[in-house]
Image (cartoon, coloured by chain):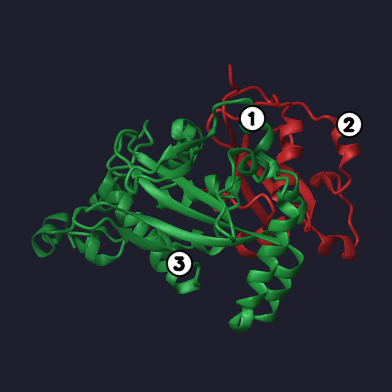
């Protein structure tokens, strides 16, 4: 079939449109040199992320601020730590420790045996993670707050000591991912935040690589897989699968735009 | 791209569980315990002179990152980032053997790495 005939029969097919649209779509219509994310793409990436979370019961949810179109992703995690973690920081920790254990044991009737065992042996911390979009930086930002089970907020010092050893040394040395206490932009409550000033350093190489190899990627998946473990947030490997990365047909204006990752 | 890094034989002696794949003469039992890893630099990261390594399955990503950092002589303030499947950063506690099972192809696991600029 000649090119002419092909155009007459299939006027909507434009050979290179799918590729350029898909990469610019997932990259947030960005300049190849930058690593910024527009808000629409942020939401799309979160949507895909949340769908997968639902599938694997990873516990993420979308929180919408009433009366606005602003929202964020949220996940709460119970994290066992050695009792000495809290003992070091507070004088009355011994008493607190027993109180925590007693309270927890009283309420574990419906808990599984595994969880009960954890509560008896360890102290348990409650970490609440929020993924927000920063309009000023035009990138996502990770906020979190941490407390003991009896509701005592962790100090900055305690949170620092719980940073993954793989990152602790460098975190203390530079502004790479400085942990700071900030007011949550949407809730107005005190949270910890991983400063986003160095996001470009670890996002740009991944974005450039995906673009060079014409592979699609989910910005949020890549970004969270890097920053999450720093503050003990686990992002399971299955998030990297193509199901979380491909755009669904309904999000695309032209069915020809839909591409599958390899 | 940066200059090639030289092979520090000292590092190899310290880490018997990570060995140059080309010189590895393994028996059947060793082959099961180790997997082949191909390291590829992205961004401004220095290219490793030796790219292919045999790594014990139980080795963690953190441990491998430390090895690469020493090999490339990164400064204490520089952070190494490792990506699997090109755009996913595995948890530092993840075992390379698991990554190989999920993302390995043609008998090897391809890992991309980059680094943050030194502070100051």
**Number of numbered discs on residues:** 3
Q: Is residue A134 above or below residue A50?
A: above
Q: Which residue is mark 1?
A: A172
Q: Is residue A253 above or below residue B12?
A: below
In the rendered view, does B45 fall on the left or right side of A73?
Answer: right
Position in image of residue A46 (x %, y %): 36, 57
Disc nearer the start of the sequence (1/3) = 3
Q: Residue at (65%, 26%) from the top-left corner?
A: B77
The colour assigned to chain A within the rendered structure = green
Q: Measure the C-alpha gap from mark 2 to mark 3.
A: 44 Å
Q: Which residue is mark 2?
A: B10
In the rendered view, does A37 fall on the left or right side of A231?
Answer: left
Q: Nearer the viewer, mark 2 or mark 3?
A: 3
Position in image of residue A254 (x %, y %): 19, 60
The reply to whether callout 1 and callout 3 are in contact (CB within 8 Å) is no
Q: Which residue is mark 3?
A: A53
């Amino acid at each position: 079939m000649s090119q002419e005939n092909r155009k007459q029969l299939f006027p909507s097919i434009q050979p290179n449109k799918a590729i350029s649209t898909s990469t610019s779509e997932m990259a947030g219509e960005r300049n190849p040199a930058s690593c910024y994310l527009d808000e629409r793409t942020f939401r799309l990436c979160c949507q895909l992320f949340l769908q997968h979370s639902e599938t694997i019961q990873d516990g993420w949810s979308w929180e919408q601020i009433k009366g606005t179109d602003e929202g964020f992703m949220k996940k709460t995690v119970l994290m066992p730590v050695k009792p000495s973690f809290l003992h070091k920081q507070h004088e009355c920790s011994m008493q607190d420790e027993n109180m925590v254990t007693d309270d927890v044991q009283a309420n574990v009737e419906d808990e599984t045996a595994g969880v009960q065992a954890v509560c008896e042996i360890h102290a348990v911390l409650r970490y609440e993670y929020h993924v927000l979009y920063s309009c000023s930086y035009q990138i996502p930002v990770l906020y979190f707050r941490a407390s003991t089970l009896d509701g005592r907020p962790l100090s900055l010092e305690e949170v620092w000591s719980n940073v993954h050893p793989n990152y602790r040394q460098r975190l203390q040395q530079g502004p790479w991912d400085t942990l700071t206490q900030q007011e949550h932009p949407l809730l107005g409550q005190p949270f910890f935040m991983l400063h986003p000033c160095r996001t470009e350093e670890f996002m740009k190489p991944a974005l450039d690589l995906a673009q060079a190899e014409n592979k699609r990627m989910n910005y949020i998946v890549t970004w969270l897989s890097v920053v999450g473990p720093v503050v003990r947030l686990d992002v399971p490997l299955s998030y990297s699968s193509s199901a979380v990365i491909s755009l669904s047909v309904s999000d695309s204006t032209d069915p020809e735009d839909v591409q599958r990752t390899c | 791209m940066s200059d090639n890094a030289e092979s520090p034989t000292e590092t190899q002696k310290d880490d018997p569980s990570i060995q140059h794949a080309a010189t590895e003469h393994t028996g059947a039992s060793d082959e099961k315990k180790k997997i082949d890893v191909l390291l590829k630099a992205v961004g401004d990261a220095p290219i490793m002179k030796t790219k292919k390594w045999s790594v014990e399955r139980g080795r963690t990503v953190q441990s491998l990152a430390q090895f690469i950092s020493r090999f490339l002589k990164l400064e204490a303030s520089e952070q190494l980032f490792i990506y699997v499947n090109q755009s996913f950063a595995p948890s530092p506690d993840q075992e390379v053997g698991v990554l190989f099972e999920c993302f390995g192809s043609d008998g090897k696991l391809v890992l991309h790495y980059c680094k943050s600029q030194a502070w100051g």
